[in-house]
Image (cartoon, rainbow, N blue to C red):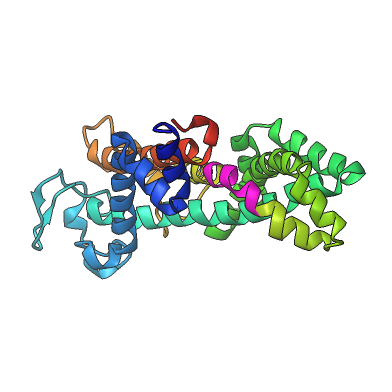
Amino acid sequence: MNAVAPAAARAAESPFRRIAGDFVANPVAVFGLLLLGLILFLALFAPLISPQNPYDLAQLDVMDSRLPPGSASPTGGTFWLGTDDQGRDMLSAIFYGLRISLGVGVASTVFALLIGLTMGLTAAYAGGRLETLIMRIVDIQLSFPAILIALILIAVLGQGTGKVIAALVTVQWAYYARTVRGAAIVEKRKEYIEAAKCLALSPARIVFRHLLPNCLPPMIVVATVQVAAAIALEATLSFLGLGLPITEPSLGLLIANGYQYLLSGKYWISFFPGIALLCTIVSINLVADQLRDVLNPRLQR
């Protein structure tokens, strides 16, 4: 009875309190969550806390070009992380770059998730030739490297925020379709789905009211990981000069801007945006890893 009581009390807890308790019990997950919260705060409130608006040409001065960290500006102020070749304050540029990188990553993940959920649930519930057709398309797409598909799409579509998001959505949706299809097939064979069919419920109601909620836990984990993957892929495209335009510098574009100055000792132009990109991806992956442990009953202690 003593062993059963804690388990029963834990089962009676609300899902939010249980997830929060599991996060607090893991110091690594707490660190990742705090770091991600700080990054989101800096990105959301960048216009309010940035010392400079890197998009305002009136605030830029050629005399401030490529100043080292901690330098005082001839026009007043201190550049704690230095400046780039255009005289932009690197601290402000990183804050604004976080906004763009996170925005592109989250937007592409949301659209890809919606498409992948629809295709995966349709394939699992309909079955037959439709399932075969959808899964063959998924298999063909996943057989090619994601970066290759993204490069081809960007070469065809051209540069631009919307076009980069479209390319990332095209790359990502197949991951969700395969994952949700596997989870939906397992749920489809259970008794509550058979009972819903016996009650003559419409297929749409069965799929979205009964099947979809039980397939969401693994999708949440995959979506969290794919946000980090989308940010990394967008940074790669921007570093190669095929991603976002220079008027909307993401973290990848900021790293590319300072690459040519590395050998001359001006490391800070690429180094600090690279650290920001690394912290963003690591924090998201740490949170995703803990979500995987929390939402998967087999991994819970």
Q: Identify the residue at horizontal 29%, vertical 45% (top origin).
A: 35
Q: Is residue 33 magenta?
A: no
Instruction: Please say if 160 is above or below 137.
Output: below
Q: How many marks?
A: 0
Q: Residue at x 46, y 49 (%)?
A: 12
Give the quarter of the figure containing the N terminus.
top left
Quarter of the picture containing the C terminus is top left
Relative image position of residue 225 (x, y in whole percent): 50, 41
Spot occupied by residue 41 in the image (x, y as percentages of width and height) = 30, 58
Q: Position of residue 137 (x, y in %)?
A: 79, 40
| Most common SS among magenta residues | helix
Instruction: Examine the structure image and report whether residue 214 is included in the region drawn in magenta.
Output: yes
Q: Say whether residue 199 is left or right of residue 217.
A: right
In the visual, does 85 lie left or right of 75? right
Task: Check the image and report above or below for 244 versus 261.
Answer: below
**Residue occupying the point 66% across, 48% down:** 170
Residue 122 appears in the figure:
no
Seen from this angle, which residue lies furthest front?
1
Residue 47: image quadrant is bottom left
In this view, 184 is above or below 87: above
Considering depth in this image, is 40 or 17 the residue closer to the camera? 17
Q: Would residue 111 appear left or right of 6 to someone viewing this image?
A: right
Residue at 76% in and 62% down: 205
Q: Position of residue 18 (x, y in %)?
A: 41, 47
* Observer able to see residue 135: yes
Q: Residue furthest right?
A: 129
Magenta extent = 213-221
